[in-house]
Every structure is written in structure tokens, then in C-alpha cells.
Amino acid sequence: MTKGRDVPAAHASSDPVPQDYATILAEIKARIHTAQYEALKAVNRKLISLYWDIGRMIVERQQKGSWGKAIVEILARGLQTEFPGMSGFSARNIWNMRSYYFAYHNHEKLQTLSAEISWSHNLTILERCKIEDRRFPPGIRREDAILFGSAG
């Protein structure tokens, strides 16, 4: 590229640059940025969905009584062995997956909304907003307060 312009250096000395080159280049750049952003959002939704499913599987088995607390450590080791170099499968994060599912499984709107933000943001919300521990004024159901934003 030549300095100060988005014109390829090889093209700068040959044929003249079309008048609409800058416009087309800007449009292509915008489309690339949009595609990158949409791809990141899609990956995030899939990751959150995966973590939801892992949390669900653990909770369901623990509720049936077939799995105890030690299974999380065992799963973490098994997943880290199967997927070396892939992050996200520490025992702590698997506990977070379980907590994430457990906190939102009865709140369909929150499930949907939580898939639109990053895993780290979800963890921050879970840590700071212990939904189950909150007390609400008489006549206000916990579920209504959570769904309509008065749970603060």
C-alpha cells in the first residue's frame, strides 16, 4: 500500500485508480468486519450452548443420585486429556457450567439472553447476582423480579 492511501503499491505506478475504488474498498472492509463480528457471535452462542449442555448433564445425573461431587474433577481430567491445549475444561470451569445451568434452567428468557454475552460476562453476573439468595418484597415473585429487571 502506498503511504496515506488505500491503493496497492504495485497499482500506484501503473493504470490510474478507478474513481470508486475508495468507496468499494471501504464497503468491502465493512463487510469483512461485519462477517468477523457475526462469526464471533455465532461461536460464542455455540460455546454457551455447549457449556449449558455440559452443566445440564451434570445436574441431571447428580439429581438422580448417580453422580457425586468428585465427577467434576474426573471429567476435567478426562476432557483435558482428550483435548490437550484446549482451554475451558478445568474443574473450576466445569463447576461454573453446572452453576450456570442450575441458575438459569427455570428462566427461559435469561437462558436466551445469556447466550448473547461472553462466558466471562456470564460468570461475572453469576458471581455478583446470587439469584437464589435474594429476598424480594411481599407480593413480588422472585421469577417476576428477575425477568423484569427489579432484582437489583
Image: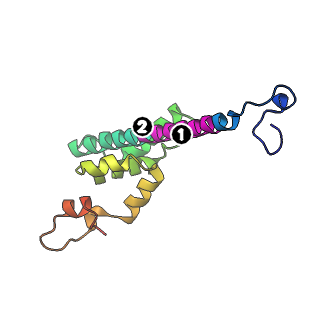
Q: Residues within 10 Å of mark 2 (few under 14, many from 20)?
A: few
What type is the residue that disc 2 sits on? Answer: Lys
- Residue for badge 2: 46
Q: Which residue is pictured at 24% across the width and 51% down the height?
A: 107
Tell me the tag on residue 34.
1
Which contiguous range is marked in magenta?
A: 26-46
Q: Main secondary structure of the magenta part?
A: helix
Q: Residues within 10 Å of mark 1 (few under 14, many from 20)?
A: few
User: Is 38 within the magenta?
Assistant: yes
Quadrant location of residue 148? bottom left
Q: Secondary structure at mark 1?
A: helix
Residue 51 drawn at (x, y percent): 39, 42
* Real-space Cα separation, disc 1 to disc 2, in angstroms: 18 Å
Q: Which residue is pictured at 34% across the width and 44% down the height?
A: 55
| Foreground disc of the pair 1, 2 | 1
**Image quadrant in which the C terminus is located:** bottom left
Looking at the image, the residue that sits furthest to the right is 13
Residue 75 drawn at (x, y percent): 42, 39
What type is the residue that disc 1 sits on? Answer: Thr
The answer to whether residue 81 is visible is yes
